[in-house]
Amino acid sequence: MKNIVILISGGGSNMAAMVRTAQQQQWDKRLGARVAAVVSNKADAAGLAFAQAQGIATEVLDHKRFATREAFDTALAERIDRHDPALVVLAGFMRILTPGFVAHYAGRLINIHPSLLPAFTGLHTHQRAIDAGCKFAGCTVHQVTAELDVGPILDQAVVPVLPADTAASLAARVLTQEHVVYPRAVAQLLSKM
């Protein structure tokens, strides 16, 4: 079985979309894959309750308990590796990962970013797209590399930027597409493993 470990920090809507898609499309039978665990760096992450309700193993590892980013990432990798992951999926995991962590999961670590990369890496992507006068925005699934938001692009979805858009309204429209494109990209990766 190809195990997927999903990392979250909050509500976990992309994680929930991934779990639902895996169930609906029977990834276990069709792709020999399953969401094996959800790990959060925040004990109050709402997504943990959803995962637990689905019978998925959950773990919390509070980054504030570690003196350095490297120490946290080492402990995080130990937790993840207990689940023998074929893929490690970042789904709103709000931590910049160390080069050692990224190297440990090279080719198996993926993220979704709320812009059409290579445009608007980093934070505040929706407001930056509006401020720049973009006619289109969207999201990108990419492999994670040591450099933030520049790994190979796996899939993208495009939405129009409407004249009355705010960062919040654009973010909501992009998020609906994230819930489609992220599971699709993961299924495509799994089918090649």
Image (cartoon, helix red, strand yellow):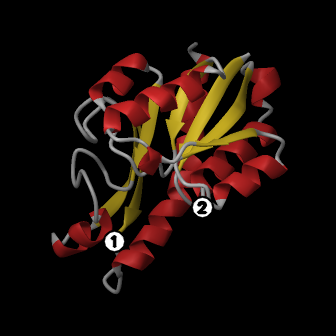
Say whether disc 1 or disc 2 marks the residue closer to the N-terminus: 2
Instruction: Give percent across and percent down for residue 180.
Output: 58, 49
Place of residue 32 in the rendered image (x, y in percent of width and height, measured from the top left) = 74, 18
Percent across and percent down for residue 117 are 27, 46
Tell which of 162 and 69 is nearer to you.
Answer: 69
- Kindly identify the residue that appears in the image at 56 percent across and 15 percent down: 192
Mark 1 burial class by Cα count in 10 Å: few <14, some 14-19, many 20+: many
The residue carrying mark 1 is 161
Q: Which element type, helix, strand or loop, lies under badge 1?
A: loop
Q: Against 167, is 139 above or below?
A: above
Marks 1 and 2 close (CB-CB < 8 Å):
no
Specify the amino acid type for callout 2. Answer: Gly
* Disc number placed over residue 192 in the picture, else none: none
Distance between the alpha carbons at the discs numbered 1 and 2? 25 Å
Determine which quarter of the picture holds residue 33. top right
Residue at 59 percent of width and 38 percent of height: 6
Q: Is residue 30 above or below residue 72?
A: above
Q: Which residue lies furthest to the left in this view?
A: 132
Looking at the rendered structure, the number of numbered marks drawn on it comes to 2
**Residue designated by label 2:** 11
Observer able to see residue 156: no
- Is 94 rendered above or below residue 184? below
| Residue 9 vs residue 109, the one in the foreground | 9
| Amino acid tagged 1 | Val
Please tell me in which quadrant of the rendered image residue 149 appears: top left
Q: Describe residue 185's horizontal placement relative to residue 72 as left or right.
A: right
Q: Which residue sits furthest top?
A: 193
Q: Residue 182 in the image: x percent, y percent?
A: 53, 43
